[in-house]
Image: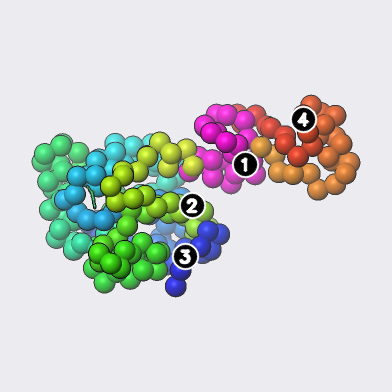
Amino acid sequence: MAVYLGQKAPGFLVNTTKGPLSLENYKGNWVILFSHPADFTPVCTTEFMAFARRYDEFKKINTELIGLSVDSIYSHIEWMKNIKEKFGIEIPFPVIADINKDVAREYNMMDEKTGSTVRGVFIIDPNMIVRLMIYYPAETGRNIDEIMRTLKALQMNWDRKLAAPVNWQPGNDGIVSAPGTLDEAINREKNGSKTWYLTYEAVR
Ligand code: BEZ
């Protein structure tokens, strides 16, 4: 099976560093599911620490983080312990031990040549629909600011039906969806839009 934008996120019941986890239990929350190539690797370690530092910020906007790799639960536990000991950072979110590669294959996170997961990010909305998919190269760490920005853009769309223009940042104006009638189009310009198909709206 492949995963597509706009599709229902494939469900899973898995073993994690925080115990068993079912995706179903996250209904009503935004979820960031992210895969990493391997435990005890330098780039992944920086990413885990960066996600952990911003965990409360994600929680505040109703968003749960879930990590995943094909490493075992014991490997994950030892890596989390090591990060705490060496860097003083506790990883507060669950990390899936996908040793059978079931979730990785379902979400197209597998590099079948190496047998490892790729550096993938999936944002799943509160209705459990996949809203974003990004893949990064193994040698390049994710940009957490960009993941946060895109999540907030999706949440603006969810709350206000506004789209995010190029280089949008939280607090910037959103874009209203296109008018459906000629009258509405004419009104948009009368009300100050430069052209009928591009109308900004302030977000407060
Ligand atoms: C890393 O996280 O450092 C890494 C993982 C896989 C390949 C290259 C780098």
Which is nearer the N-term, disc 2 or disc 3? 3
* Mark identifier at residue 163: 1
Task: Tell whether label 4 touches label 2 (CB within 8 Å).
Answer: no
Which secondary structure lies at badge 1?
loop
Q: Which span is picked out in magenta?
A: 151-174
In the displayed structure image, the side of residue 184 where residue 29 appears, left or right: left
Which is nearer the N-term, disc 2 or disc 4? 2
The structure residue drawn at horizontal position 42% and vertical position 57%, both measured from the top left corner, is 26
Three-letter amino acid code at the position of disc 4: Ser
Q: What residue would you read off at disc 3? A: 3
The Cα atoms of the two marked residues, 2 and 1, are separated by 14 Å
Which is nearer the N-term, disc 3 or disc 1? 3
Task: Tell whether label 3 touches label 2 (CB within 8 Å).
Answer: no
Residue 139 visible in rendering: yes
Q: Is residue 160 magenta?
A: yes
Residue 168, compared with residue 100, is above or below; it is above
The outermost residue toward the top is 192
Three-letter amino acid code at the position of disc 2: Leu
